[in-house]
Image: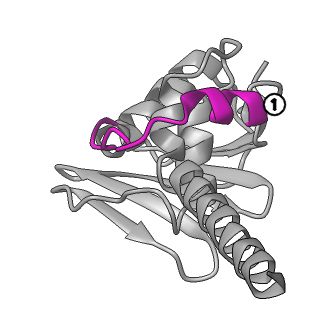
Amino acid sequence: MQKRIFLGLLVGLYVVSGMSLFTFFNLKYNSVYYAQHMPHKEGTEPDIIMLMENKVGAYTPEIDGISYDDDGSYSITREKGTKTSVLDLTGDTLFFHSESDDMYLLNRNFSIKSALDKRYHKIKYNQRKVLKEIRETVQPVIDAQPKPFINLQWLFNLIYQSRFN
């Protein structure tokens, strides 16, 4: 009788830990997809944030003109003709190097902290234009995210929605 109870507890523990691992990896690997479909405050860009934060887990397809770099920081580079733009995440700071050689430092809420030209002089900027350029840089990767086999959108929203509202 004690062996059955012990075996039942062991199997139950195995099932619960397996389900927890599945849930963790599902949320991690599909975070960009879930972020795309989550209600959020305008200007927060959860899909871009999740793409940059979950560099190991998020799906990064091979797309012509786009490359990924994860040596120390994580960056996505888009080459379009002779123009190149780079979005880089280091610590809590997003760094965006635009096609026009301007550089922007943003926090994770997508507020621009600093804007510099190629000679490191402060410049005036249009926040909407900068966010549009960032979106154009990473949009092909976001569009390529697969739909999850088991959709846990409700759980993702429960965990992350307060962060992006």
The residue lying furthest to the bottom in this view is 3
Q: Position of residue 65 (x, y in %)?
A: 21, 56
The N terminus - image quarter: bottom right
At a point 62% along the width and 72% down the height, the residue shown is 73
Task: Please give the range of residues in magenta.
Answer: 143-159
Foreground pick, 79 / 21: 21
Please say whether residue 147 is visible from this viewpoint.
yes
Q: Residues within 10 Å of mark 1 (few under 14, many from 20)?
A: few
Side of 93 where 61 appears, left or right: left
Q: Position of residue 130 (x, y in %)?
A: 55, 28
Foreground pick, 50 / 70: 50
Residue 102: quarter of image: top right
Whether residue 154 appears in magenta in the rendering, the answer is yes
Foreground pick, 104 / 74: 74
Q: Position of residue 33 (x, y in %)?
A: 44, 37
Q: Secondary structure at mark 1?
A: loop
* Residue type indicated by callout 1: Arg
